[in-house]
Image (tube, rainbow, N blue to C red):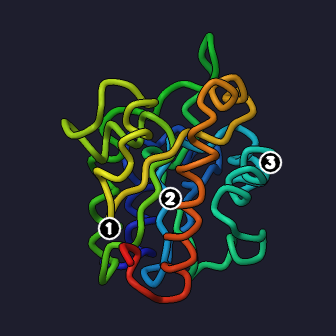
């Protein structure tokens, strides 16, 4: 299986027929050599329209958190981005709808199988954390992020960098004080070609 055949299969899948009919291709960024893997929720409308992830204030903050500049972030062999849904799922009453059920189960393992080794995997937000960590995730996002060390060296859970989380960040100063320095250290190690759990 190659990325090209996977992409074609995704577009041909009945679950995505409406998007394909409208000329909307799946949005993800994948390179089997990537040193970092970001797993998030799903692209927003803006990302889907622009065909580019994190090209917004959330992305600027995420790059700051990772200690990366824009050029290195979008370098394919540095960062792969595989959300739980490769299409914008629509708007709900309080923001974007959650990723569609079944999409990640069908496609994520096939992409991960193409990676010779699992890179440092950053889990952005509660949907990604619950999906990837399963029963080992804490009862709340805050608790999962507080216990990030429990999931190392493979996974590093963080809150979503959206401006909508400014209140959370203000209430949880420990995140920027103690979690981000460790995240940046591990990202540097991974990008330098060392083991992410150095």
Coordinates of residue 132 in the picture (x, y in percent): 30, 47
Q: Which residue is mark 2?
A: 38
Q: Which residue is mark 3?
A: 56
Query: Helix, strand or loop at disc 3?
Result: loop
Marks 2 and 1, how far apart at CA: 12 Å
Vertical relation: 173 (above or below) 177:
above
Is 143 placed left or right of 96 in the picture?
left
- Disc sitting over residue 100 in the figure: none
Q: Which residue is mark 1?
A: 112
The quadrant the N terminus occupies is: bottom left
Residue in the image at 66% along x and 39% along y: 44
Query: Helix, strand or loop at disc 1?
Result: helix
**Callout 3 crowding tier (Cα within 10 Å): few <14, some 14–19, many ≥20:** few
Which sits earlier in the primary sequence, circle 3 or circle 1?
A: 3
**Callout 1 crowding tier (Cα within 10 Å): few <14, some 14–19, many ≥20:** some
Residue in the image at 68% along x and 70% along y: 73
Residue at far left of view: 135
Marks 3 and 1, how far apart at CA: 27 Å
**Callout 2 crowding tier (Cα within 10 Å): few <14, some 14–19, many ≥20:** many
Vertical relation: 12 (above or below) 70:
above
Residue in the image at 38% along x and 67% along y: 6
> Do residues under tags 2 and 1 come within 8 Å of each other at their CB atoms?
no
Count of marks overlaid on the render: 3
Vertical relation: 101 (above or below) 195:
above
Which sits earlier in the primary sequence, circle 2 or circle 3?
A: 2
Nearest-to-viewer mark from 2 and 1: 2
Coordinates of residue 77 in the picture (x, y in percent): 56, 82
Marks 2 and 3, how far apart at CA: 16 Å
């Amino acid at each position: 299986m190659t990325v090209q055949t996977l992409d074609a299969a995704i577009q041909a899948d009945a679950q995505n027929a409406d998007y394909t009919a409208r000329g909307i291709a799946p949005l993800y960024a994948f390179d089997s050599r990537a040193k970092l893997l970001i797993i998030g929720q799903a692209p927003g409308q803006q990302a889907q329209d622009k065909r580019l992830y994190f090209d917004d204030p959330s992305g600027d903050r995420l790059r700051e958190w990772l200690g990366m500049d824009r050029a290195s972030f979008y370098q394919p062999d540095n960062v792969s981005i595989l959300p739980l849904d490769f299409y914008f799922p629509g708007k709900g009453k309080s923001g974007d709808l959650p990723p569609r059920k079944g999409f990640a189960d069908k496609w994520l393992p096939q992409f991960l199988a193409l990676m010779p080794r699992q890179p440092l995997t950053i889990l952005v937000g509660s949907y990604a954390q619950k999906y990837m960590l399963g029963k080992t995730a804490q009862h709340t996002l805050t608790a999962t992020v507080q216990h990030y060390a429990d999931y190392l060296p493979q996974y590093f859970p963080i809150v979503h960098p959206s401006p909508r989380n400014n209140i959370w960040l203000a209430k949880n100063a420990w995140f920027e004080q103690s979690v981000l320095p460790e995240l940046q250290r591990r990202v540097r190690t991974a990008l330098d070609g060392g083991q992410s759990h150095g």
